[in-house]
Image (spheres, rainbow, N blue to C red):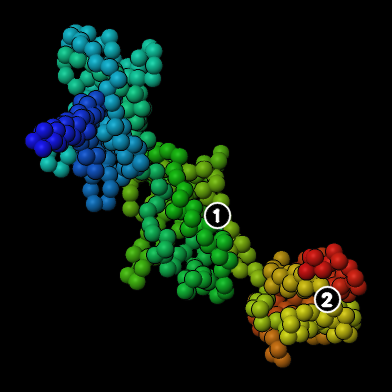
């Protein structure tokens, strides 16, 4: 019994040894080894000050509530992305190898006058510094030094992330705003002045006329302002606007945000040699952008307005009446969701759906009269063609089509003001041959399509 107890105690002791020394101790030793291999040990999110002296310039960065700011050589917003990349390199770089050097040998490794000198501090005031030198002849490493007596080899990504110009470090947004907060904006370009107001999820033009705006064009304007980036900064102080054709800009956009209508603006010159000059309403500097940046702003009223002519809920439609060249064509849907010609022949459901989509997606090629009162000259008193859409017995949409002139057909929706013109070729889609709409008897292929 006593022998058994002794064996148990020995087993417990061995187990404790294995756990505390081999397992837990191994984990601690591995952690200590990892710490020893790292160039620095710090929490990158705690860093709030960075100073860099390099052949490309001297830079000072401070972290604020609004993100990183450049304090030297100019005072402006910084681009958070390259700074975060630098801090990530500093916090993860490991010493591949360490060699002893004398102070007078530093230049041999690029750790003297041509080195990048980097200092950074955390919120508690703890400071770290490193000199970053040349790349090694073999391998993808660079020499760095924390003291006068040693040089370490670390991956060259650290140098790549530290060796940047002022433009690399600075914020490259043309203008700062929150797209979802914009409630109104006015855009002035060589083709006019246009004011847009957001109502719910939709945008409308209120000047020079009141009409619905085309959502895609408004989104293109705001998306470009939000995501577009400048190419260069040509003037930090921005005092000589006339030099860059900004005293009377070709394009200007003024945005109002939120209930308090906070104002944000940007001005742009005319494009020349694929380049335009720009300035926002807050920062002093003058920058350049390419012609693609300006593209969404360079539209006339027709380009900005919604060009849809007719709208209805497809799910409500139970009857379609078409009349073209004095030839009527009427379809109705029964309670089984099957479409028929009024004479009883079964219609192809996919053809009916395609026709409804064609009608609903019809767009104006030209706006002829914003508020028409006389229709005689357009062939719309007794229309040559007509479309009626019913939901049960209720007329939910209608369209009259009149004379054709210069490849365009005068078109009017009695439920909307503008008299418009569409392309003549659209008539073929709006009024297809009856035979194309009907099912063929025992046609298995058509049944599969349905």
Instruction: Tell which tag, 1 or 2, sits nearer the viewer.
Output: 2
Q: In this view, does 232 lie above or below 141?
A: below
Which quarter of the figure has residue 163?
Answer: top left
The quadrant of the image that shows the C terminus is: bottom right
The quadrant of the image that shows the N terminus is: top left
- Answer with mark 1 or mark 2, whichever residue precedes in sequence: 1
Which label number is shown at residue 296?
A: 1
Q: Name the residue rendered at 35%, 41% in the picture.
A: 81
Q: Judge by depth and name the residue closer to the eye, 432 or 164.
A: 432
Q: Is residue 246 above or below residue 83?
A: below
Q: Name the residue rendered at 16%, 13% in the picture.
A: 149
Neighbor class of circle 1 (other Cα within 10 Å; few <14, some 14-19, many 20+) is: some
Q: Judge by depth and name the residue closer to the eye, 30 or 115.
A: 30
- Could one spot residue 33 in this view of the protein? yes
Counting the numbered discs, the total is: 2
Label 1: which secondary element: helix
**Real-space CA distance between mark 1 and mark 2, rounded to the nearest whole angstrom:** 43 Å
Label 2: which secondary element: loop
Q: Name the residue rendered at 59%, 58% in the picture.
A: 299
- The residue that mark 2 highlights is 347
Which label number is shown at residue 391?
A: none
């Amino acid at each position: 019994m006593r022998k058994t107890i002794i064996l148990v105690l020995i087993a417990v002791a061995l187990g404790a040894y294995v756990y505390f020394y081999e397992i837990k101790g191994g984990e601690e030793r591995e952690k200590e080894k990892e710490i020893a291999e790292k160039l620095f040990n710090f929490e990158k999110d705690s860093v709030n000050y960075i100073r860099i002296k390099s052949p490309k310039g001297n830079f000072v960065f401070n972290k604020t509530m609004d993100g990183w700011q450049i304090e030297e050589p100019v005072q402006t917003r910084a681009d958070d992305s390259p700074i975060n990349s630098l801090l990530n390199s500093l916090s993860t770089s490991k010493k591949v190898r360490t060699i002893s050097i004398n102070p007078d040998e530093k230049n041999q490794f690029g750790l003297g006058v041509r080195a990048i000198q980097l200092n950074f501090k955390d919120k508690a005031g703890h400071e770290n510094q490193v000199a970053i030198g040349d790349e090694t002849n073999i391998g993808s490493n660079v020499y760095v030094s924390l003291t006068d007596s040693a040089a370490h080899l670390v991956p060259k990504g650290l140098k790549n992330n530290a060796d940047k110009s002022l433009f690399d470090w600075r914020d490259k947004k043309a203008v700062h705003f929150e797209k979802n907060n914009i409630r109104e904006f006015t855009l002035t370009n060589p083709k006019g002045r246009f004011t847009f107001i957001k109502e719910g999820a939709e945008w409308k033009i209120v000047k020079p006329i009141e009409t619905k705006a085309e959502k895609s064009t408004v989104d293109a304007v705001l998306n470009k302002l939000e995501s577009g980036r400048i190419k260069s900064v040509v003037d930090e102080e921005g005092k000589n606007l006339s030099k860059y054709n900004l005293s009377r800009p070709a394009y200007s956009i003024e945005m109002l945000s939120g209930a308090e209508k906070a104002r944000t603006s940007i001005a742009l010159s005319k494009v020349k040699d694929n380049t335009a000059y720009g300035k926002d309403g807050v920062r002093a500097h003058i920058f350049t952008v390419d012609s693609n940046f300006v593209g969404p702003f360079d539209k006339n009223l027709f380009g900005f307005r919604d060009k849809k002519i007719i709208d209805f809920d497809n799910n409500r439609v139970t009857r379609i009446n078409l009349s073209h060249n004095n030839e009527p064509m009427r379809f109705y849907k029964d309670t089984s969701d099957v479409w028929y010609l009024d004479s009883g022949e079964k219609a192809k459901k996919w053809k009916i759906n395609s026709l409804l989509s064609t009608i609903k997606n019809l767009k104006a090629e030209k706006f002829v009269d914003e508020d028409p009162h006389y229709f005689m000259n357009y062939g719309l008193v007794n229309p040559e063609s007509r479309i009626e859409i019913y939901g049960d017995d209720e007329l939910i949409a209608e369209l009259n089509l009149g004379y054709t002139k210069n490849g365009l057909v005068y078109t009017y929706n009695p439920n909307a003001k503008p008299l418009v013109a569409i392309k003549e070729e659209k008539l073929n889609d709006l009024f297809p041959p009856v035979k194309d709409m009907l099912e063929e008897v025992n046609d298995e292929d058509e049944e599969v399509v349905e």
